[in-house]
Image (cartoon, grey):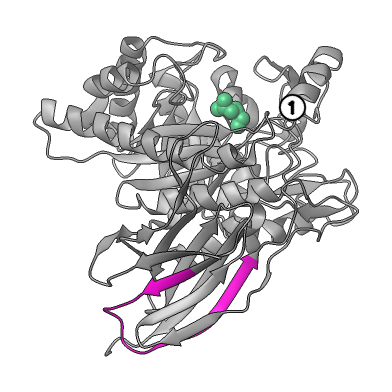
Amino acid sequence: MKSSKIILDRSYIIGKVDKRLFGSFVEHLGRCVYEGIYEPEHPLADADGFRTDVLELVKNLGVTLVRYPGGNFVSGFHWEDSIGPMAERPRRMDLAWKTTETNEVGLHEFAEWCGKAGTTLMYTVNLGTRGADDAKNILEYANHPGGSYWSDLRGKNGADAPFRIPVWCLGNEMDAPWQIGQKSAREYGHIARETAKVMKLLDPSIELVACGATGPDIETFGSWELTVLDECYDYIDYISLHRYYENYQNDTASFLAETLDMENYIHSVISFCDAIKGKRHAQKTLNLSFDEWNIWYHSKEQDKKILREECWKQTLPILEDIYNFEDALLAGLMLITMLKHADRIKIACLAQLVNVIAPIMTQKCGKAWVQTIYYPFMYTSKYAKGATVLNTLVETPEYRCHKYDAVPYIDAVAVLGEDDSLTVFCVNRDMEEDHMVTLDLRSFGPLRIKEHILLSGHYPNDCNTADNPDCVQPKKGPGGTIQGHTVTFTAPALSWNLLRLETDTNG
Ligand code: AHR
C-alpha cells in the first residue's frame, strides 16, 4: 500500500464557498426540458406538467442555481416567443440543435419550476442575433415591479410579482465558430459593455457574466479574455469558463489527470482578469463563473447520426451520455479543483441537469434514475455549501501517463463547515493500489470520525441504467483511526472518498 499525507491548519483559509458553486444548466436541447423536467402526460406529472420524480431527484442533488435557456440555443432565440398563452406561442426552428422548439415551456413555466425545485434562475440573453435593446426588454419584463410596458405585460401573462432574476449571462460562447452570431473579441467586448450598461441602468441589483473564450483549447483563448475584459471590465461581475473532458482512447490514467488541465485553465483566467485589473488601475477584483463543466463524449458519434436522420423533429435524444464509474471520479476531482479556487470561482454549473449530459436520466412515460456523476455532486454540495475551504497540502507520490508527466495519485480538499465539522473530499487516482492517507490536523482539538462515504470497487466502465439503476452508488466506508491529531484512513484504488470529522472548537 502506498502512503500519502494531507496537512491542514484551521487558520490557513482559501475562502468561503459560494453556494452558487453548485449550479446546473437546463437548455432547450434534446430531452432536457421536454420529457426531462416537463412531461404533462407522465403519471407522476403535477398540475403544471412537471415530473415530480425528477423534481425530487433535483432537490436531493442540492442544485442551488440553474442557467437557462441555453447554451447554443439562446443565440438564435427570441425570448418573446416563450411568453403569453401557451397555445399561441410560435413553433420555431432551432438552428443550434436542428430541432423544432414548441415554446411550450417558457420563462413563466421555468421560473415556476425553479420555485418548486428550490433553486435560483440564472438567465442568458441572446447576444448572437440580438442585442442590448432585447436584453433590456427581457430584464424589464422579468425584474421590474410594474408600471411599464414589459413589466405590465408580465402581469397580464399571470405573474404580478417580478421574477427577480439575480444573475444574467451576456450571451453564450460568443467566440465559437459554431455559435450563431459569432463575434470577434472586440465586437463582443463592445456589445457586452453596452448591454451591461443598459441592464444595470434598469436594475443595478443584478450581476452579469461576460463570455470568456469557449475553453482553453480554442485559438481565441487568452487574447479573447484580454480584449473583452479591456472593453467591459468595469461593467461586469464575472467572466465565464467552459470545459468538458473526454476519454476516447480509453486511457483512464490520463483521463483522471485532466484536472491538471483544469487547474491550469483556472489559473490562466485569473491571471487575465488580474492583468486587466492592473492595466485599468481598477479597485474591483473580477470573479469567475465556471458555468459549463462536465464530461462529454460518449454520445457524440450517435448524435451525428440522429442529427443527420431526424433533424427538425421535437425532442431529439441527443447528448445522452451514459456516465460510468471513472466519470464519477473525474466529476469528483473537478469539484475538488473548483473548491480549491473558492476565493475566485463564485458560480459553477454542471452541464446539464436532465437527459442531456446529465446526472439525471428519464424514460418517456417511464422511470427516472441517477447517473454515477450524481453522487460526488450531491455530497459535495451537501457538505461544502457555505463552508470554508482550507488550504489543503497533499504529499503524495506521482505517476506518469500518456498526457501528463507528473500526476499526484491523491487529490483532496478540506472544508470547515459552519458547525465546525471538517469534511475531506479525496480521490485516489491509483488504478492498482490502495493508499494509506494520513491527515495531519495539528491545529485541531479532539477529533471524532462521523462518517466515511466511498465510491469504489467498480470497473471504470460500470454505469447505472434504467434496468440497473443502483450499480454504482456510494457506500459506507470503514472510517479510520485517530491518534492525537492524526487521522489515518484507507483510500482504495480508484476511489472517491468523503471523510467527515467532528472537531472541538476549544481544542
Ligand atoms: O452544454 C452543451 C453545449 O455545450 C452548450 O449548448 C454550449 O454552450 C456548449 O458548447
Of 317 and 259, nearer the camera is 259
Quadrant location of the C terminus?
bottom left
Residue 125 percent coordinates (x, y): 48, 27
Q: In which quarter of the image is residue 353?
A: top right
Q: Residue at x 71, y 48 (%)?
A: 460
Q: Residue at x 46, y 26 (%)?
A: 215
Residue projecting furthest to the left = 281
Tell me the quadrant of ligand 1.
top right
Residue 481 is covered by the magenta coloring: no
Residue 251 percent coordinates (x, y): 64, 36
Looking at the rendered structure, the secondary structure element under dot 1 is helix
User: Can you say whether 309 is above or below 233 in the image?
Assistant: above
Quadrant location of the N terminus?
bottom right
Could you tell me if residue 437 is visible in this image? yes
Residue 448 is covered by the magenta coloring: yes
User: In the image, is 88 to the left or to the right of 121?
Assistant: right
Residue 118 percent coordinates (x, y): 57, 59
Q: What is the count of numbered marks?
A: 1
Residue projecting furthest to the front = 1
User: In the image, is 372 to the left or to the right of 344?
Assistant: right
Residue occupied by mark 1: 88
User: In the image, is 136 to the left or to the right of 74?
Assistant: left
Residue 325 percent coordinates (x, y): 70, 51
User: Can you say whether 64 is above or below 157 in the image?
Assistant: below
Magenta residues, as a range? Answer: 437-454
Could you tell me if residue 116 is visible in this image? no
| Three-letter code, disc 1 | Glu
Q: Crowdedness of circle 1 by 10 Å Cα count: few (<14), some, many (20+)? A: few
Q: Which residue is drawn at 30% across and 60% down?
A: 391
